């Protein structure tokens, strides 16, 4: 069972009541990974939201050598009480990056997206809170991609292509 | 004045009932712009969500000391499509600039704060709009992801050789598949041309890919499936499909 106290510290869940947190708790499972274990792979169907409960998770591209990454330096480390796996709410519902355990012990909460959507249908207030947060995170990633494209194209335009 | 029927056709308002559409409509204002007008600039405070009513708006990145051009376009927004979603989420800053790119364009401007207030008053409305928004952004995300790994803009030309020998061999199907993939990709910057026979009739249908700074690549015995593969792998991802290349 996921510790309620940790759930209360998760930025994305801060606006939720204890009852709402308990409802989320019920559609979550707690999993433990070691450093280097893969939680999911880039391109896989994304059906879960994840929260780091202990340790760290690394998100990175897993592309074959020579194949360009959409953004130069996407590597990010997700720490305790942070949420990831937002692509489960966005078409094509595939993970954009692979996730690996980045600490010796890494404990995560895996929340079923479909169950969350069911909760949002009955409690739209919870839906607004969480979707706003997810959109905020998507916005940050969108900006990274946009900057990657602008940098690449901008360089070519400035060099007089 | 826009009506509920207009808002109903806008993807992000999908699922809203008449009352909810009317509430949203009360926060809307219409504006008309001329070609080249900048509706907002990147980095500016994002105060409004926009919907294109007529015409087209391009979302572009700006380069210091350079005038804007279609080469800087990340996304083109047409009728019934929304843009400026930064107005709904922190840090409320536009990440691109928006330019009217048709002789005129009409847009519906919705105050972001009022909309966020509505989301709090009517959670169901808020949840529907935000979920729809995630879907819309998802599709744009896919495009921008493709652009990020694709060849730079305005330097790619795809030539389908549409002489009689090519047409007999199936070049029209190849062209149809190409146009289909072009539409899917949203890469309006890629130039598509038709031209005559290459003088290698037994290898028709031929397609030539020209990417500035690289040697042209001529593909042979193309069909629609091969065209789709070449478009996605070579034109968008830069990987020459050697198995179809015409070796001279």
Image: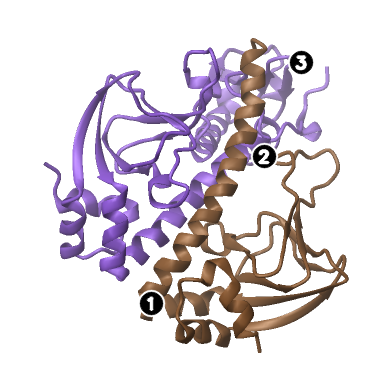
B100 left or right of B2? right
Which class describes the residues within 10 Å of circle 1: few (<14), some (14-19), or many (20+)? Answer: some
Report how far apart the C-alphas of labels 3 and 2 lie in the structure.
Answer: 19 Å
Report how far apart the C-alphas of labels 1 and 3 lie in the structure.
Answer: 55 Å
Residue B27 in picture, x, y percent from top left: 20, 49
Residue B24 in picture, x, y percent from top left: 21, 55
Residue B205 in picture, x, y percent from top left: 64, 26
Please identify the quadrant where the C terminus of chain B is shown.
top right
Find numbered disc 2 in the image and state the secondary structure of the residue it sits on: helix
Which class describes the residues within 10 Å of circle 2: few (<14), some (14-19), or many (20+)? Answer: some
Identify the residue position indicated by label 2 in the image: B229
Please identify the quadrant where the N terminus of chain B is shown.
top left
Q: Are marks 3 and 2 on the same chain?
A: yes
Q: Is residue B227 visible?
A: no
Up-down: is A134 above or below A120? above
Identify the residue position indicated by label 3 in the image: B215
A81 left or right of B241? left
Residue at 57% over, 84% down: A25
Report how far apart the C-alphas of labels 2 and 1 lie in the structure.
Answer: 41 Å
Identify the residue position indicated by label 1 in the image: A121
Q: Chain of mark 3?
A: B
Up-down: is B234 above or below A50? above
Find numbered disc 3 in the image and state the secondary structure of the residue it sits on: loop
């Amino acid at each position: 069972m996921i510790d309620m106290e940790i759930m209360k510290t998760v930025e994305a869940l801060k606006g939720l009541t204890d009852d709402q947190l308990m409802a989320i708790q019920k559609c979550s499972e707690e999993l433990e990974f070691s450093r280097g274990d893969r939680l999911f792979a880039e391109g896989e169907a994304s059906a879960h939201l994840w929260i780091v409960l202990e340790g760290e998770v690394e998100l990175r591209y897993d592309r074959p050598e020579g194949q360009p990454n959409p953004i130069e330096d996407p590597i990010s480390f997700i720490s305790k009480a942070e949420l990831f796996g937002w692509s489960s709410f966005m078409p094509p519902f595939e993970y954009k990056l692979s996730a690996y355990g980045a600490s010796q012990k890494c404990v995560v909460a895996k929340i079923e997206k479909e169950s969350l959507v069911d909760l949002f249908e009955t409690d739209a207030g919870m839906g607004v809170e969480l979707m706003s947060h997810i959109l905020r995170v998507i916005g940050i990633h969108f900006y990274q991609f946009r900057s990657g494209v602008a940098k690449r194209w901008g360089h070519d335009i400035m060099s007089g292509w | 004045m826009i009506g509920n029927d207009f808002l109903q056709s806008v993807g992000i308002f999908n699922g809203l009932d008449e009352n909810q559409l009317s509430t949203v409509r009360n926060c809307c204002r219409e504006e008309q712009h001329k070609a080249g007008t900048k509706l907002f600039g990147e980095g500016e405070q994002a105060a409004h969500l926009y919907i294109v009513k007529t015409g087209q708006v391009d979302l572009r990145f700006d380069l210091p000391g350079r005038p804007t051009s279609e080469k800087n376009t990340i996304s083109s927004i047409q009728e019934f499509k929304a843009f400026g979603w930064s107005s709904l989420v922190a840090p409320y800053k536009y990440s691109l600039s928006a330019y009217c790119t048709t002789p005129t364009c009409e847009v519906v401007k919705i105050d972001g704060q009022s909309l966020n207030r509505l989301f709090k008053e009517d959670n169901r409305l808020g949840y529907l709009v935000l979920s729809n928004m995630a879907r819309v952004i998802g599709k744009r995300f896919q495009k921008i992801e493709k652009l990020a790994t694709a060849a730079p803009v305005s330097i790619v030309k795809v030539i389908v050789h549409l002489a009689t020998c090519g047409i007999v061999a199936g070049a029209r199907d190849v062209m149809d598949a190409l146009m289909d993939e072009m539409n899917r990709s949203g890469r309006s910057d890629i130039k598509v041309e038709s031209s005559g026979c290459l003088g290698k009739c037994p290898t028709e249908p031929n397609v030539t890919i020209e990417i500035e700074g690289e040697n042209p690549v001529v593909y042979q015995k193309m069909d629609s499936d091969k065209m789709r593969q070449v478009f996605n792998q070579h034109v968008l991802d830069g990987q020459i499909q050697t198995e179809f290349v015409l070796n001279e």
